[in-house]
Image (tube, rainbow, N blue to C red):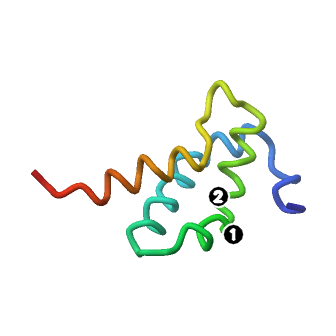
Amino acid sequence: MGAAAKLTIGELEASYPTYCKALRLLIRNGRSFEAIQRTVCWERLSLLQKCLPTRYKSPDYLYVLLKREIEQPAA
């Protein structure tokens, strides 16, 4: 978490869409939940939610939403 300590909240917030996109790609590529939890994007999403809980959802919640979105058959 040393690298994360050097980032400002503003930088984390600015990169939020990128972290969500990375999470979506990891899910789409079939990575296990445990493997995803060890990634930088998961760490940064967790940090954002910890610092600004009213503004950002937990990575666990985002994972469930994105997994459901990806697994739904196209209508």
The mark found on residue 38 in the picture is 1
x%, y% of residue 3?
84, 62
Disc 2 element: helix
Task: Give the residue pinned by disc 2.
Answer: 42
Q: Nearer the viewer, residue 46 or 64?
A: 64
The quarter of the rendered structure image containing the N terminus is bottom right
Vertical side of 4 occupied by 62: above or below: above
At x 72% / y 31%, what residue is drawn? 52
Residue at x 81%, y 56% (from the top left corner): 4
Q: Are dots 2 and 1 in contact, CB under 8 Å?
A: yes
Quarter residue 13 falls in: top right
Q: Amino acid at mark 2?
A: Trp
- Disc 1 on helix, strand or loop? loop
Side of 50 where 19 appears, left or right: left
Residue 35 drawn above or below residue 68: below
Residue 53: percent from the left, percent from the top?
69, 30
Residue at 81% from the left image edge and 50% from the top image edge: 7
Closer to the camera, 51 or 67? Answer: 67
Categorize mark 1 by other alpha carbons within 10 Å: few (<14), some (14-19), many (20+). Answer: few
